[in-house]
Image: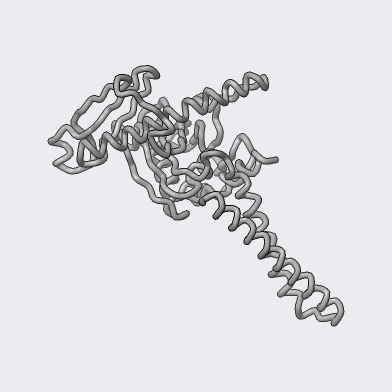
Amino acid sequence: MVYLSGLRDSVYFWEKIEERIISTIELLELAIEEDDDSLAQSLDNDITIIEKELEHREFLLTLSGEHDERNAILAIHAGAGGTESQDWAQMLLRMYIRWAEGNGFKTDIFDLSQGDEAGVKSVTVNIVGKFAYGNLKSEIGVHRLVRLSPFDADHARHTSFALVEVLPESEGNAEVTINNDDIRIDVYRASGHGGQSVQKNSTAIRITHIPTNIVVTCQNERSQFQNKELAMKVLRARLMDLELKNIAEQQSKLKGEHVSAEWGNQIRSYVLHPYRMIKDHRTGHETSNTDDVLDGDIGQFLKSYLLSTIK
């Protein structure tokens, strides 16, 4: 039924576009016949609307992957560099949360490890909404920041790195089978924010998937049960992502190519000194409006990358 509904929406869209184009052509013919320049503005507006609708439809073509409509599980890990990189990881967290809020997505922090002095060492966020994963899959990789350090008494220029992971949320146990004998569950006291009741009780959960050595933690909920449920959700997503990577690796071997989204694969640079510029190294898209981007306006980068994948 969902598939049929999607087809109906697609047919309706093209029917409305056809009606608008026919109407615009008729108005143009009338303007030419009557030699009426007063209709120029109306025609210009109609053409602009049609162009925007077609551009949006083209963008939707980039969100046709098998898992693109799903919620996303986004993880950020500070790189080497201590406080500098941990602060950068927190800046990225704020950027993605602001983007999500501005685009109608809900966010829920599953797990957060505070930095030693500032920032975060790592954080896992659930971003809920249609096409959350499809939009954010372009963010997978290493993000590099160049700035004058606010933590350095000499205000020297520092380069910081953070790794961003984006996983499609598994839609249920049927997709990923987890044998209870394959996991080890450890319970411990939560740290950081969460209230006194969280601190006094052992509510945090660490799950280790023994065959793959994947470890997931969750400590932000007040009950052990809730944290276990969320940790299992992340584990299922990571196991599904591992399977997808294995399939992609086999396909790339057949094609004779291999691209890794690990630490060495830097995707974007955010330069705040000696000049201001954010540049995506995959598409070449760049902007000097660094403040808006770090405040969540990353749509231009998401769109430029996704459009590049269909050309």
Q: Nearer the viewer, residue 146 or 164?
A: 164
For image coordinates 20% across by 41% down, the residue present is 222
Q: Nearer the viewer, residue 137 or 97?
A: 137
Tell me if I can see residue 85 in this picture: no
Image quadrant assignment for residue 239 = top left
Q: Nearer the viewer, residue 92 or 19?
A: 19
Left or right side of 96 for 6:
right
For image coordinates 49% across by 26% down, the residue present is 243
Give how far across and how far down residue 254 sits, in percent: 65, 20
Question: How many dots with numbers?
Answer: 0
- Which part of the image, by quadrant, shows the C terminus? top right
For image coordinates 38% across by 47% down, the residue present is 107
Give how far across and how far down residue 62 sits, in percent: 61, 44
Give how far across and how far down residue 279 sits, in percent: 59, 40
Image quadrant assignment for residue 177 = top left
Give how far across and how far down residue 8 sits, in percent: 59, 57
For image coordinates 51% across by 28% down, the residue present is 244
In the displayed orientation, state which residue is furthest to the top: 211
Tell me if I can see residue 253 in this picture: yes
Left or right side of 133 for 287:
right
